[in-house]
Amino acid sequence: MTTEEKHIFFNEKIYPYRGLISSVCRSFGKDEMSVEDLVQSIFLRIYNKVESVKNHTNLKLWVLVVSRNYCINQFRKESLRLNVQNGLEYYDKDMTYNLKDVLADRLQVFNKLKSNEKIALYMTSQGYKYIEVAKVLDIPEGTVGSLLFRAKEKIEKLK
């Protein structure tokens, strides 16, 4: 695939999903600038893999999965730099041992959840409405409540 063909394929087949990618990124971004950074990073990642995607049967689903996974990975990286209420500005190796244990335990419990449960929990904790979560996860609005209930039950069992 030539650079020209790659560029044309990307513009015709991938770029129309910009709104979908932006919706996924909004569930993780703190502000419009960080959302745009996530979108651009995802586009770059997809552009670099466009040759392997050309014959993919469900391009929309592939774009959604790539976007969601990228955002989850970025969210995990940010979770390691948690802004802690007691004045610590960021996570680093000099934190007290007890705080490291608490953060590690919470992250371990969170990582045992399914990806859609993580997204739903995160989005609702950031103030998103069930309808917005439903759109990002591509599920009915009523299912979001059930998903959150099950996720919270799992967290309680895993504590």
Image: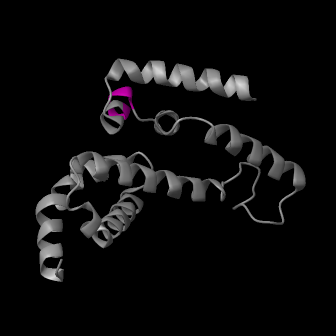
Residue 146 relative to residue 44: left or right: right
Q: In this view, does 103 lie above or below 48?
A: above
Q: Which of these two is toward me, 85 or 12?
A: 12
Residue occupying the far bottom of the picture: 3
Residue 92 relative to residue 45: left or right: right
Quarter containing the C terminus: top right
Residue visible at 16% across and 81% down in the picture? 2
Asked if residue 22 is among those painted magenta in the image, a careful observer would answer: no
Q: Can residue 97 be seen in this view?
A: yes
Residue visible at 60% across and 24% down in the picture? 152
Q: Which of these two is toward me, 63 or 36?
A: 63
Measuring from the top left, give residue 53's x and y in whole percent: 26, 61
Residue 61 relative to residue 104: left or right: left
Q: Is residue 29 visible?
A: no
Q: Main secondary structure of the magenta part?
A: helix
Q: Range of the magenta residues?
A: 129-133
Q: Which of these two is toward me, 153 or 36?
A: 153
Measuring from the top left, give residue 57's x and y in whole percent: 20, 48
Residue visible at 44% across and 56% down in the picture? 70
Residue 110's quadrant in the figure? top right
Residue 110 relative to residue 12: left or right: right
Quarter containing the N terminus: bottom left
Q: Is residue 142 above or below residue 94?
A: above
Residue visible at 45% across and 49% down in the picture? 28
Measuring from the top left, give residue 72's x and y in whole percent: 49, 51
Q: In this view, does 131 lie above or below 107?
A: above
Measuring from the top left, give residue 108's x and y in whole percent: 70, 43
